[in-house]
Amino acid sequence: MIQLAHILQQPHTHFLELCLGLVILFTFMSLAETTNRKKESVKDRCVLCNTETEYDHSTHINNREYYIEGCGQLCPPCYHPIMIDNYLDAGQKNKIS
């Protein structure tokens, strides 16, 4: 026991280097795990019914269908009735003018 206490009191550069190496290793492992989680595809959900859509959250809106600016991503069943109603409303307004 006395020998262990004596050893721990001595400056051991190898021990400190080992500890520093382990800290760096665990830091990089933690960063890699965080990066891998970010790479997992997170699908966008329909803003109306909360159904998962086919598009990853990282997909640019120019590369999506069923996306309405100012509203968000919609699924096809929610998108079509809205667009049909919009189309019909626009047609009705044109007939009145």
Image (cartoon, helix red, strand yellow):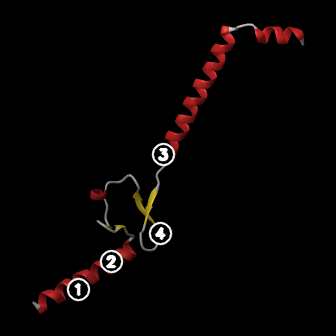
Looking at marks 2 and 4 on the same chain, the residue that comes earlier in the sequence is marked by 4
The residue beneath circle 2 is 80
> On screen, 24 above or below 57?
above
The residue beneath circle 1 is: 88
Q: CA distance from mark 1 to mark 4?
A: 26 Å
State the SS at label 3: helix
Image mark for residue 38: 3
Residue 80: x and y, percent?
32, 77
Image point (78%, 12%), residue name: 8
Residue 39 or residue 70, whichever sits in front: 70
* Distance CA(mark 3)–CA(mark 4): 21 Å
| Callout 3 amino acid | Lys
- Label 1 sits on what residue type? Leu
Q: Is residue 27 left or right of residue 9?
A: left
Q: Badge 4 is on which residue?
A: 51
Q: Is residue 47 left or right of residue 68?
A: right
Q: Specify which label sits upstream in the sequence, 3 or 2.
A: 3
Q: Secondary structure at mark 2?
A: helix
Dots 3, 4 in contact, CB < 8 A: no
Image coordinates of residue 67 in percent, x first then y, are 32, 66
- The image shows residue 18, relative to residue 90, as above or below, that is above
**Residue 33 placement (x, y as % from top left):** 55, 39
Pointer 3 or 1: first along the chain = 3
Contact (Cβ within 8 Å) of mark 2 with mark 4:
no
Which tag is nearer the camera, tag 3 or tag 2? Answer: 3
Whether tag 3 and tag 1 are in contact, CB under 8 A, the answer is no
Quadrant (top left/top right/bottom left/bottom right) for the N terminus: top right
